[in-house]
Image (spheres, coloured by chain):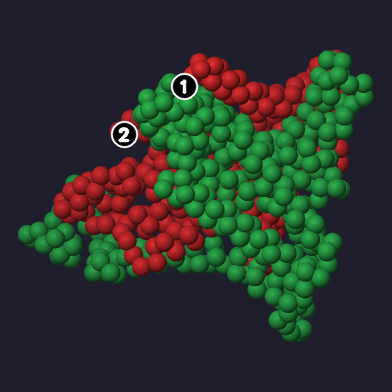
């Protein structure tokens, strides 16, 4: 008890914690617990270290560890190896990528697809976020947002399958077009970049919508009213006020959607065709075979991650300078 | 002018609602089609696909397997995520920004890269592909979502309550368990539901870290690769109804809880 007194800012005498008969009271007065607590709370410094030790250990071993191990494997000549063979440092896996143009196309395609789909998502969701934040009463906002949230709780695979049914040769879209008399023969929508785009926008739209919505919602209506009073037209109000002040939302939404889009594996496999192979499929290919290609797969993953980070980094820098340019 | 804008924007909104709902509705309808052949039009209807999957031991087993993985991984994510949130919100310390960056890392790594990295790391730690590996990868991947939600809630907590408890003699642990933790309950529950859904829906990590037993999304994926069938629709529909219902319930619960405490 005396140690507890010293912790609680030298109150006079021993302090009783709660009711003696309650669980907490009994715990606080239990000998071993008191010894433990007096050990923990001997100084704020020690207390902080005990609080911090586990999270730091977890973050280093579980969050950073897998990435570092992937980097290490990408720099080995073989992995996993037989017990008596020595592993050697080698850049071979990286040379493999840069030496063979056959691998460049999927990476390039992944980046282009991700960028185009991100832009499409932005163009589709911006008016929706604007509508929700500006034209709907507070009470309905939540309801209308909730309606959009429901499909996004459904998993990636189920939603991809739904798109397959919509776009198939005997799918609903072809049936509807036929019924309208626009086509005689079904259009092969599936296994093209169109079906992939439709699927990916479907999967990522919410990650764009939410940052945009919260950025637009924070923007005071009075700004626009003031500009209107000063004679600014609708378009220039949007371009001079709304857009620059929501650039942060645009920037974070686009970054998120871009990173997610580059990482899709199942959706391109199911919705894409041979002409739309993305880098995720290339990487996965090295892990299906018996394991001796792991360094190559790891190196390709590292390359893709670095390129994706570079693209988003440049993009964010650009957005920042754009915002500064607009406001000055 | 403003009115015209409003109508156009409302149309875009409802068109988008159609875009996100129509594929799912079509998928649900197709699960009732009385033919093995996927495609429109549907001429006769049946419940056979549903009775089929509910008497299929493999499907039921996979369902239970996915639910257990979701529950266990959520338990780990919530415990670890809350702890990290308490650390990050406790005070400023050297390296806090770096710690925060490390914390969000798993949420920002693109799916395929995260799956590959976990696969390689699991091999290094000598974790066999299978249930344990999947639970572990889901748990690590979901930690940032818990931490972010709990941090947001912690930042709104009045400091005076903790100070009062400490003045009355509670040690830090008891003050945390009796004051902070009850205050965090809505955030923790909301985050757990979110983790459950993320884990239950996850494909890429389960696919690369799984052994011979598939989780539900992996099973659907494998079935799809060998051809579409209304059976897949029935399984997907059950999964869809379950996840959407849990999602809606959680949304309402967290909203009410947040309202109640303010």
Q: Residues within 10 Å of mark 2 (few under 14, many from 20)?
A: few
- Residue A182 visible: yes
**Which chain corresponds to the colour red?**
B
Residue A77, placed above or below residue B203: below
As helix, strand or loop, the secondary structure at mark 2 comes to: helix
* Circle 2 chain: B
Q: Colour of chain A?
A: green
Q: Which mark is residue A136?
A: 1
Q: Which mark is residue B175?
A: none
The x and y percentages for residue B25 are 70, 23
x 67%, y 65%: residue: A302
Image quadrant for the C terminus of chain B? top left
- Residue A213 visible: no
Which of B105 and B217 lies nearest the eye of the viewer?
Answer: B105
**Marks 1 and 2, Cα distance to the nearest angstrom?**
26 Å
* Circle 1 chain: A
Which of A159 and A93 lies nearest the eye of the viewer?
Answer: A93
Left or right of B244? Residue A179 is right
- The nearer-to-camera label among 1 and 2 is 1
The x and y percentages for residue B152 are 39, 45
The residue most toward the right is A185
């Amino acid at each position: 008890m005396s140690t507890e007194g010293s912790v609680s800012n030298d109150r006079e005498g021993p302090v009783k914690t709660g009711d003696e008969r309650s669980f907490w009271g009994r715990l606080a007065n239990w000998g071993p617990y008191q010894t433990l607590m007096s050990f923990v709370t001997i100084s704020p410094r020690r207390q902080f270290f005990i609080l911090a030790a586990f999270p730091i250990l977890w973050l280093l071993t579980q969050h950073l560890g897998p990435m570092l191990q992937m980097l290490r494997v990408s720099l080995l000549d073989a992995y996993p190896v037989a017990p008596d063979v020595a592993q050697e440092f080698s850049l071979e896996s990286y040379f493999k990528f840069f030496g063979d143009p056959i691998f460049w196309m999927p990476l390039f395609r992944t980046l282009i697809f991700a960028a185009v789909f991100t832009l499409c998502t932005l163009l589709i969701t911006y008016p929706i976020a604007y509508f929700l934040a500006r034209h709907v009463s507070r009470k309905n906002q939540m309801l209308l947002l909730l309606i959009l949230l429901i499909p996004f709780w459904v998993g990636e695979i189920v939603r991809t399958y739904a798109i397959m049914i919509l776009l198939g040769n005997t799918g609903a879209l072809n049936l509807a077009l036929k019924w309208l008399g626009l086509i005689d023969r079904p259009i092969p929508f599936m296994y093209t970049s169109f079906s992939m785009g439709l699927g990916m926008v479907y999967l990522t739209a919410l990650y764009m919508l939410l940052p945009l919505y919260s950025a637009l919602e924070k923007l005071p209506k009075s700004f626009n009213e003031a500009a209107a009073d000063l004679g600014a037209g609708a378009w220039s109000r949007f371009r001079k006020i709304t857009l620059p002040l929501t650039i942060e939302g645009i920037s974070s939404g686009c970054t998120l959607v871009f990173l997610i889009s580059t990482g899709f594996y199942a959706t391109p496999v199911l919705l894409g065709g041979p002409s739309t192979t993305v880098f995720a499929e290339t990487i996965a290919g090295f892990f299906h075979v018996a394991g001796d290609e792991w360094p190559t797969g790891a190196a390709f993953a590292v390359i893709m991650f670095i390129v994706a980070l570079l693209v988003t980094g440049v993009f964010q820098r650009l957005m920042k300078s754009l915002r500064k340019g607009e406001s000055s | 002018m403003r009115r015209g804008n409003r109508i156009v924007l409302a149309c875009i909104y409802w068109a988008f609602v159609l875009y996100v709902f129509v594929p799912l509705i079509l998928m649900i309808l197709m699960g009732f089609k009385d033919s093995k052949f996927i495609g429109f039009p549907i001429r006769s209807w049946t419940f056979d696909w549903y009775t089929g999957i509910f008497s299929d031991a493999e499907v039921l087993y996979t369902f239970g397997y996915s639910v257990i993985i979701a529950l266990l991984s959520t338990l780990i994510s919530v415990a670890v995520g809350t702890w990290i949130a308490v650390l990050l919100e406790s005070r400023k310390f050297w390296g806090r920004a770096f710690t925060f960056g490390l914390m969000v890392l798993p949420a920002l790594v693109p799916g395929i890269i995260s799956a590959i990295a976990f696969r390689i790391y699991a091999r290094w730690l000598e974790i066999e592909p299978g249930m344990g590996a999947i639970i572990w990868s889901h748990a690590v991947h979901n930690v940032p979502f818990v931490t972010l939600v709990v941090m947001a809630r912690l930042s709104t907590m009045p400091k005076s309550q903790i100070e009062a408890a400490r003045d009355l003699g509670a040690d830090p642990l008891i003050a945390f368990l009796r004051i902070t933790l009850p205050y965090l309950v809505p955030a923790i529950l909301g985050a757990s539901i979110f983790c459950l859904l993320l884990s239950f829906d996850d494909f890429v990590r389960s696919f690369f870290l799984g052994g011979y037993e598939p989780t539900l999304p992996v099973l659907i994926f494998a079935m799809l690769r060998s051809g579409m069938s209304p059976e897949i629709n029935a399984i997907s529909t059950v999964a869809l109804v379950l996840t959407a219902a849990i999602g809606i319930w959680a949304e309402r619960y967290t909203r009410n809880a947040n309202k109640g405490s303010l």
